[in-house]
Amino acid sequence: MHRRAFLMSAASALALTAAPAQAQLFRRGPPDMAPAHEQADFILVLKGARRLILFRQGTAFREYRISMGNGANEGPKRFEGDGRTPEGLYTIDWRNPNSLAYLSLHISYPNAEDVAYAASHGRSAGGDIMIHGINNGWGFLGGLQRTRDWTAGCIAVTNGEMREIWSLVPDGTAIELRA
């Protein structure tokens, strides 16, 4: 127990000393898009493995460890506020350079089937499911954010990873989220 407390304290101290440098790094705004021949044409999210994989012409070329909604292990997203991450086929349909978390790519959840399911239970399906970096002001946590699922249903990566994903994933990219 003492060792874990010491390690968390040491990691926090190290992260805090790096925070000003990292804050400066990400103050530049979103990165430019990569050339078209380097961009992804498909994203696969493996919820159980906590992985997001970018594909180009059927070949995986980048893989990231992720955090998800705090109810991600309980099945697909069904209702607003359930903390779950969706499952199924969707599209990256827009991006937000000024989101509450560092950069964000919107996933087209809910689709008509998701809305119908929620409505049949007298509930809202929710929305605003994104791939994003760490919440603004907390970027110094870096990879520590992966120690638990903490989003409201979104997919989270580090801010550096989000810069890369932002540049490699154009709007209109298909995304499949699997259990």
Image: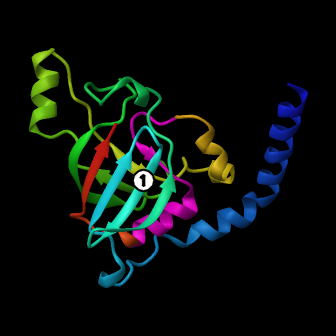
* Image location of residue 79, percent across then percent down: 26, 24
* Image location of residue 129, percent across then percent down: 33, 43
* Image location of residue 85, percent across then percent down: 35, 36
- Amino acid type indicated by mark 1: Leu
Work out whether 105 lies above or below 48: below
Work out whether 116 lies above or below 49: above
Start-end of magenta stretch = 150-167
| Side of 51 where 40 appears, left or right | left
Work out whether 6 lies above or below 61: above
- Does any portion of residue 99 appear in the rendered image? no
What residue do we see at 47% from left, 29% from top? 70
| Side of 7 where 46 appears, left or right | left
- Furthest residue in direction top, as rendered: 121
| Side of 145 where 101 appears, left or right | left
* Element carrying mark 1: strand
Residue identifier under label 1: 52
What residue do we see at 62% from left, 50% from top? 137
- Does any portion of residue 154 appear in the rendered image? yes
What residue do we see at 41% from left, 62% from top? 97
* Image location of residue 177, percent across then percent down: 30, 45
User: Could you tell me which quadrant the N terminus lies in?
Assistant: top right
Question: Does the magenta run of residues contain 14?
Answer: no
Number of labels in the image equals 1
| Side of 70 where 35 appears, left or right | left
Work out whether 146 lies above or below 149: below
